[in-house]
Amino acid sequence: GVTPVPQKAIGKYNVDLAVAPVAVEVLGGGWHLAKRHHAVRTPYILDQGWALLFVWNHEGDSALTQRAAEYVIAYLDEARRDPSLVGQYRVISGSGELLARGRREDSKFPLVPPPRRR
């Protein structure tokens, strides 16, 4: 029952998907860990009145799971009910497992990748 906006502009940055008040970034592969701009983008987006959800889809994973999609919808529902979630971020795996969470005030934004499949 929601219509996400792909490549939503939030100030000078675009996020992969957005349904106010949640912005979603889908990260794939380990090369995202080397991108230092996440440390700048993340607080900027949070300061613009968004909650931010990172979804790690590691290389080799063919698709995000139903559980990850359900997590995104649950987080959206929660953020719409509780405005205090604006300014917070969460990181989940492509399987929907919570990996990290925090607030803008933490000044730390761990983008923890899920373990690689063996």
Image (spheres, grey):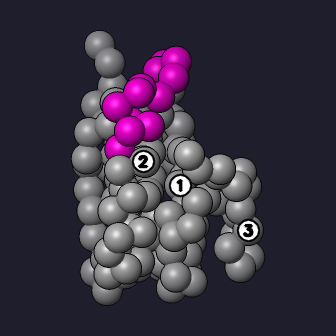
Counting every numbered tag in the picture gives 3
Q: Could you tell which of marks 1 and 3 lies nearer the N-terminus?
A: 3
| Between marks 1 and 2 in the image, the one whose residue lies nearer the viewer | 2
Q: Residues within 10 Å of mark 3 (few under 14, many from 20)?
A: some
* Magenta-colored span: 60-71
Would residue 78 be visible to someone looking at this image?
A: yes
Mark 1 vs mark 2: which is more N-terminal? 1
- Residue 115 image point, x, y percent: 28, 31
Q: Which residue is mark 3?
A: 9
Q: Residue furthest top?
A: 118
What residue is pinned by disc 2? 72
Badge 2: residue crowd in 10 Å (few <14, some 14–19, many ≥20): many
Identify the residue at image location x=53%, y=37%: 28
Q: Between residue 78 and residue 36, name the one nearer to us.
A: 78
Q: Is residue 53 above or below residue 109?
A: above
Between the residue at mark 3 and the residue at mark 2, the CA separation in whole angstroms equals: 19 Å
Nearest to the observer: residue 16 or residue 22? 22
Magenta run includes residue 62: yes
Q: Which residue is mark 1?
A: 24
Pointer 3 or 2: first along the chain: 3
Crowdedness near tag 1: few (<14), some (14–19) or many (≥20) residues, C-alpha within 10 Å:
many
Q: Amino acid at mark 3?
A: Ala
Q: Residue, x 35% and y 44% (percent of image)?
A: 71
- Label pair 1/2, CB-CB below 8 angstroms: yes
Q: Secondary structure at mark 3?
A: strand
Q: Secondary structure at mark 2?
A: helix
